[in-house]
Amino acid sequence: MGNGDYQCPHPVAIPPSKPLSKSLQSSIKETFFPDDPFRQFKNQPLSRKLVLGLQYLIPILEWAPRYTFDFFKSDVIAGITIASLAVPQGISYASLANLPPILGLYSSFVPPLVYAMLGSSRDLAVGTVAVGSLLISSMLVKEVNPHDNPKLYIQLALTATFFAGVFQASLGFLRLGFIVDFLSHSTIVGFMSGAATVVCLQQLKGILGLIHFTHETDLVSVIRSVFSQTHQWRWESGVLGCCFLFYLLLTRYFSKKRPVFFWINAMAPLTSVIFGSILVFLTHAEKHGIQVIGHLKKGLNPLSVSELAFGSPYLSTAIKTGIITGVIGLAEGVAVGRSFAIFKNYHIDGNKEMIAFGMMNIAGSCTSCYLTAGPFSRTAVNFNAGCKTAVSNIVMATAVMITLLFLTPLFYYTPLVVLSSIIIAAMLGLIDYQAAIHLWNIDKFDFTVCMGAYLGVVFGSVEIGLVIAVTLSLLRVLLFVARPRTSVLGNIPKYSMVYRSTDQYPIANNVPGVLILQIDVPVYFANANYLRERISRRIFEEEDRIKSSSEITSLHYVILDLGAVGSIDTSGISMLEEIKRIADRKGLELLLANPRSEVIKKLDKSKFIENIGQERIYLTVREAVAACNFMLHTCKPNPADAGQTIPENNV
Amino acid sequence: MGNGDYQCPHPVAIPPSKPLSKSLQSSIKETFFPDDPFRQFKNQPLSRKLVLGLQYLIPILEWAPRYTFDFFKSDVIAGITIASLAVPQGISYASLANLPPILGLYSSFVPPLVYAMLGSSRDLAVGTVAVGSLLISSMLVKEVNPHDNPKLYIQLALTATFFAGVFQASLGFLRLGFIVDFLSHSTIVGFMSGAATVVCLQQLKGILGLIHFTHETDLVSVIRSVFSQTHQWRWESGVLGCCFLFYLLLTRYFSKKRPVFFWINAMAPLTSVIFGSILVFLTHAEKHGIQVIGHLKKGLNPLSVSELAFGSPYLSTAIKTGIITGVIGLAEGVAVGRSFAIFKNYHIDGNKEMIAFGMMNIAGSCTSCYLTAGPFSRTAVNFNAGCKTAVSNIVMATAVMITLLFLTPLFYYTPLVVLSSIIIAAMLGLIDYQAAIHLWNIDKFDFTVCMGAYLGVVFGSVEIGLVIAVTLSLLRVLLFVARPRTSVLGNIPKYSMVYRSTDQYPIANNVPGVLILQIDVPVYFANANYLRERISRRIFEEEDRIKSSSEITSLHYVILDLGAVGSIDTSGISMLEEIKRIADRKGLELLLANPRSEVIKKLDKSKFIENIGQERIYLTVREAVAACNFMLHTCKPNPADAGQTIPENNV
């Protein structure tokens, strides 16, 4: 390294400080409106703005004018296909939520209509979800027994649905959709698999034809409950259940092998119900231990505004249930919608989706529907059936309406065991062990979060699993911020301008007499102490290393590469001041490289730049090293005195 | 930009993946042992290891052999000085905690001895703290009335102290000291100022000579309580209080002007007590509405192990109080110790300090002492008096012992109003409005946190203020991680190798046909969705800009600079995969620059590198841009085919 090439360093820009109102405005915009939804309103006449505004709020206004007959044909086919799934699933999931089966059908009528108008996904099929149903039941059963007090239980379920809707819609209106982001993918994988396991376990009641069953959902309680009443098991029920389960799994296997046969899988639940009902009707098996659905009321959804129990002593339970189920519903629904949108190359607005989900649950809670969201299975069928727009939801709703008006008596003989088989078949698809293996391979911590959620749900309860997973996820973020890496940088040979971590690039060489450290997180109160410890230890270790080796040049300079420090707070600035003092005491000089605008602004305001000297701040690590080398080889002059220009290196 | 200079890019190293046990071990070491405490044990014989181990656990063994007579002289002077402060402060703070005054004296005897053996600070003066005393009283009074049931109240206070000690010591043993780091500097400023304000308000009782007083601590309750009993105000008490307060503030003013007179300030509380007691003794003012301390028991600390109320129904309150006061005590004590250590250029081990604090509180709780920590005022006096080692604490303890054995009767006539004045004078120094102004100037969010804590404490309660401040601080960290910046980079003219944010360096030029984006935080589930939105919007905006401007080259390449991305999780990888898909659909090519070792390892494992192509990952932004330019000007060949070497640029 020659010492004659010292070059005038490029100045590090200190952006002018903006007035408070302006910087506040821009940070609010970045935080709440990352997608800049008002972009299209710019420079438009008022009437056009009104139309655009209405279209923004009610997406159907935007795409309906472009709707064609070809689209309609596809949507009718898809709509009928998902209706054939919606009817048996609706009945099954309602019983999972300890609600009357008819509520499951009601819930597939009004909410899809609302969603079709407000939703921005073209593929999402709306309906009740297994995990949400389980959550409602497991949270409400603690307060009210659905068998002793069915009316109050239904009221609470509807009230919870109402609050879920209010919560979802307000998240959307307040543009707080990012709260849902804190449920990470690994949390959802673990949680959903756990919930699916629990739901399957609950079906042992139906499969074995048991009358009494535990209200707990954890593995231990369920197994104990099942094996404590072996004398109550009904073999007729068990055999029937296993047959249908086999049939359902077989059709799924086939449709996976040959995607064109997807409709075999899609129709399998309905054919199971029809076949099971005919079987019972012919053999009168309902008199031989096979439980059936029984009488279902004819007619459309009755209004249920008066059922919302705002004055109930259990209101707080209803609110809590609403919020938790609302968040889970959103997380699943938005994720499902987003995946299919990416597949088909269109965009989904998360906040709009939340408003749509919220509105459909509010409307639902007033018309005898309980919690609805966007179940993965139904949406996948919708997609495979070739749906084009949300009209497929309208078609499904119409089909369910016809069922409600005319066909409910046909379900009298439907055996419960068939419904259990349908639920188990759907749930087994949700236990995503492949995703868990993928997590294990890539990121052990994500795997831990996933297993924490899974085991929490299976051995504790749904809420325990959720709390474990969210806590672990947050802890991870906090731990990452609290325990950042500091790496020693070295010069990559033959690339004199490039300095990289010596851990990652073992060929990178130390610069004699200079220690280059890189901090790679925002410097905050949470990590300021740790960074101080870590940096002083790095300096200490470097001095040790030089002493024990036979290097001639002792340590003279410490360069902090702040290029990866996106932000700093007052604790972080104090930390830098302490590092400066530590360096001063050791007779070392501290230089900074590449501070970012946020950081340099604050360093300037806090007079740290005055303290360290403007001439000790460099645009690049390379310039800082050049300055150090120049000073080292010319008896340490003030680096500000030096002055030449960097030779050009045209690329 | 010539297109002939295309150079062979330097390969980006993918570090070999370590076995799980090894990477786990190294990350545990980085997380819990950043200071590498076992370094000194390496390569030592067993006997030496034993000695070092003992010295590590009991620091006095380390420095005692080097203790000199000169040190001793300094320590004796400092010790006597802080004892003169400790006696009146001990009595005052005990009454603030609603405990008998004698407990305040006991607490200045045993804990300092324990700390002198275990602590690593040379300046910290141990004793009771105002905020801790207030916290104990405000939390315990909710459960037990100290006037109706004084015995139970004392038991609970001792039990809380015991748990505070256990909690502090376990934090230290488990090396979880970083939990304290989550109380940011701004939180502590706001919280301490708020607590000091509340403590001052409580002294209105003593100053005005009131008998009845509210148990609430908030401003509104206190003002209402004071003004609802104006007829009870005692002017004698008020006048005396104001005089002493004036005297105390005057001495502080003088000692601040002339630091050599610090001892005037240090001795002021003792002289106030002596003068006040003599005044009362001579005028028999205790019969005219001036309340006095009265009888104090002679003798050393009685054992109180049997008083620890582990079986009490209020145990959970005691544990909660212990944990909260323990954390607050630690936060203040460690911060105080650390500041003076930096001043005197020695090192404090946070985890060791925690063990020392914990042990002294456990020992204290067994010997009739309540919560002790390292009060700032007393430590500053100790420092100013020229203390050299923790022996000054031993001297102070001895002086307090003599007081306990022989001098307690002298305090019979000490008027309570003098104690109130002493507390107010001490507390006014803690209201750090200058720090708040500093926070406002540098970081508005830190200021908000600070004011949140202050207003929460003053208008709510001590706990509410703490919860507000910690929540705000955590929210800030989470918000920062959830809403990162993405900046567009441009080439700085004349520095062809340097690419910087165009926001910070407006002179930086866009590279035609290439969009360079920098992500500056770890990519996590919490920000993956946001980053996807933001990056796709950036691409969209760039396309818009090119369309509306008259640039010839349309957008062809997107370079993501990952140099500041310290880590990534599976959600982050999915985000990159989606960005890749978005880019593919738009016919853009995605290139990555400078991925760090953590990131590239995971990208490799998840096959993302295969997906994007190893040849699209570059060591620097500059190389990526060079590749883009080469491809742009030679009809887009595969960048991997090109091959030349970069000309050297020796520095």
Image (cartoon, coloured by chain):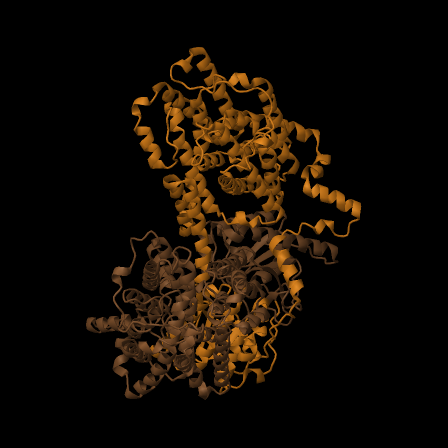
Chain colours: A brown, B orange
In the foreground, A623 or B629: B629
Percent of width and height locating residue A317:
38, 55
Q: Residue at x 61, y 53 (%)?
A: B32
Q: Quadrant of residue A513?
A: bottom right
Horizontally, residue A217 falls left or right of residue B41, namely left
Q: Residue at x 63, y 61 (%)?
A: B24
Q: Does residue B607 appear in this view?
A: yes
Using the image, determine if residue A271 lies above or below residue B64. Answer: below
Q: Residue at x 57, y 70 (%)?
A: A442
Horizontally, residue B340 falls left or right of residue B542, namely right
Percent of width and height locating residue A2:
65, 65
Using the image, determine if residue B613 lies above or below residue A24. Answer: below
Q: Residue at x 44, y 76 (%)?
A: A418
* Quarter of the image where the N terminus of chain A is located: bottom right
Percent of width and height locating residue B377:
51, 33
Percent of width and height locating residue A573:
50, 51
Q: Quadrant of residue A284?
A: bottom left
Q: Quadrant of residue B431?
A: top left
In the foreground, A167 or A31: A167
Using the image, determine if residue B6 lies above or below residue A614. Answer: below
Q: Furthest residue to the left?
A: A47
In the foreground, B541 or B574: B574
Q: Does residue A644 appear in this view?
A: no
Instruction: Please count the marks in the image.
Output: 0
